[in-house]
Amino acid sequence: MRIPSFLGAARALTLSLVLLGAPTIVAAQTDSAKATAPRALRELLADASKRNVLPPSLISFRSNVETEISVLLRREEGNEAVAAVEQVASTLKWNRTGFYDQRIVGYRAQQTGANVSMLSVFQTGWLNPVLYGNRLRVRSNSSRRTSPQRGGSDGPDTLPAIHPLAVDREQYYRYSGGDTIVTVRAGDRVIPIAQVRVQPRTDIAGSVVLFDGEMDLDASRGTLVRLRGYFVRVNAPRRGVLASLSDAVAFVEYENGERNGEYWLPAKQRIELQTTFPGLGDGRAVVRIVSRFSQMQVNDTVLDARALAAADSLRARSRRRLSFTNPDSLGRYGAWQADVGALSLGMHSDDFNDIGPDRWRSTGAPRLDYTVPRASDAFHFNRVEGVYTGTGLKWSLRDLAPGMVVRANAGWAWNEGTARGRLSVERTRGNTVLEVRAGRSLDNTNDFRVPLDSGNTAGALFASQDPYDYVDRRSATMAAVRTTGARRVLTRVEFGVADDRYRPALYVRSPFGGEAYRENRRVDQGRYLRTAALIEWHPDFSAEFAKPGVGARLAYERGDGTLRWQRAEIRATARQPFGPFVALARADVGMVFGAHIPPQQLFELGKFQNLPGYEDKEFAGSRAAVLRASLQYTSPYFRQPIRAGRFFLPALAPGLSVGVQSGWADAVSTAARTSIERLGAPIDSTLLASWAPVARPTDGIRASLTAGVRLFSGGVFVGATRKVDQAAPWKALVTFGQQW
């Protein structure tokens, strides 16, 4: 199984932009209008500001913290694929003098490909120990680094931000809301929560870091319960060229819990770094950091009178110290409170859209952006088109016509000499999206693909690896999509017209050399009415990626016209970690039927299509099933991340992996058998005696076995594969990703 190459590019893109620093930089506007809050809200804020002073009796605390750092890609349609998860157990010590010590005592990870560790970004502590005071400490965009092993102190690693409850808050913020929205229970007490919208003023002179977002207050006591939003630097120097072409935002969600009946201290914290290059698509690269605090001991330290007199929690005298316990203890750690990937279940990158950059919001004045839906619409390469480049426009009508978006993108296949593109209009109402689109595309016909697998530009361009077949398709479609239960279920129905045409491969091999490509397999040409329906349960879950859970998919499609067929597919997928093991399984079943089945609708299996022990697309049929399962074990050895200069690599964490891939395809009807024959080039009647189809049914169940060693928390597999349905030698196999 191959992970799409652009997923690694997205991870690298995220890391590079994160290293540019946070907070997000925005320029202050010159509007001098002053927004005032209603009197009741001002009184609530005044009371909350008085209570936000660091309590004199709060001296220190010690807490266990479990953190999950996820790297994921949000696709343009909203689905997320988790590429890597690092789980960190640490102990945090804090006192009111500003002392901060975070020690990592446990570490484990799951990777779907080679990647740097996100500890490369967080080389000092990432937790915010208290939300009290007139100033908050937020991560600096300084390029100064230090070794977490030394806990260096070459200057503070945070910047002061004006607290939305500071005594001088009205110079910097405007407020709205304040109505009680929900109640929560803490012990025997029911707490009414008031939500306040906080926005930077637009008439600020000078450079300052401010908060933009929401603040939840205990309406009965005026204490701060939650902050949700992001920090912005107002009137900062002009951004660099790379930064100006991107949207990069560091969202935070800090939740406090009541301790000892009198202090509000951290309970859960979420930091989400989201990056997008609009010119390269609507997808986002995301780093999500979720931390939960437990077993907190308050006032566990005694400070002398001089330390108390000098205490000032608002001043950072040193960097937030981050260190590791010894490697043996790190590998033996077993007191995990959650499975890998479980801390961020239920979260989604769209959770912050309402307070994100203007480009992401669904409200406001209409705006026009130069963008394409996905990166492949801007550039891709395959053996049929050669080099393809394109561009696009996105017109969001927003308040002019709520939920309405018009898109247009077009490009040119330079070697093929063909223009392609599409025009779409979509309307979003609540959880329902209505869409009309039309265009011309080169669709690939591979079956039972993994999520995000829509082609492989890097492999095709540099290594002559293009294991796809293509059909030139013109289409016009109406569609309705509905999500229910916080993306628990996705339903899609489509109706339209289409016209399929054959295009031969123009390249014999990659421009950079390598083995010859396969010829693009034949298709039946013709027009048809297309009807399709899809139901997905847990569309964000996939055995190929690191998010644990169970998902399923049911799809139906039919064509009526010159081409006529019906096709149905069922998929079930599961991924479950338990202790040092991870179990993965996926099953796909499909059937296509009709009196004259188009070859492009057949199911094809082989080396790159879920049966690694066989040849590329060796088998084909009108009915097919694939079952894949794997059990992976990670040893307790070499669990500490590897430091390489200023970066960390994931821990070597060697382990064992065994997997089985079985597939079956048959052709019981004459229509199916003749369709397989048409996959190849037109038959020369003079060569009929020596002619053979390019693919064949499996004649029973075919299976292959993989076994070997996994390195870097599962990101690299070194082992072998062999056919198990016949006597065959083992073949060496080295892959990057979750090869089964």
Image (cartoon, rainbow, N blue to C red):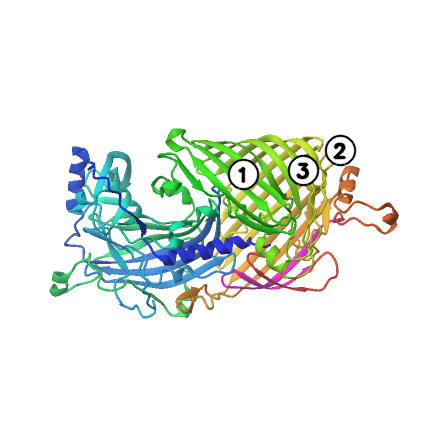
Q: Amino acid at mark 3?
A: Asp
Q: Is residue 199 magenta?
A: no
Is the residue 13 above or below the residue 475 in the image?
below
Q: Nearer the viewer, residue 560 or 504?
A: 504
Image coordinates of residue 78 in percent, x first then y, are 47, 42
Task: Residue under label 3, please give it.
Answer: 500
Callout 3: 10 Å neighbours few (<14), some, many (20+)?
Answer: many
The residue sitting at 55% across, 59% down in the picture is 632
Task: Residue under label 2, please give it.
Answer: 595
Q: State the extent of the magenta-drawn residues as a range.
A: 699-722
Residue 329 left/right relative to 169: right
Q: Nearer the viewer, residue 483 or 188?
A: 483
Is the residue 16 above or below the residue 45 in the image?
below
The numbered disc on residue 142 is none
Secondary structure at badge 1 equals: strand
Q: Amino acid at mark 1?
A: Glu
Which of pointers 3 and 1 lies earlier in the amino acid sequence?
3
Image coordinates of residue 125 in percent, x first then y, are 32, 60
Residue 174 can be seen in this image: yes
How many angstroms separate mark 3 from mark 2 (CA)? 18 Å
Task: Residue under label 1, please give it.
Answer: 536
Could you tell me what secondary structure mostly forms the magenta stretch? strand
Secondary structure at badge 2 equals: loop
The residue sitting at 47% across, 49% down in the picture is 73
The residue sitting at 33% across, 62% down in the picture is 143
Dots 3, 1 in contact, CB < 8 A:
no
Residue 539 left/right relative to 416: left
Image coordinates of residue 688 in percent, x first then y, are 86, 48
Q: Amino acid at mark 2?
A: Ala
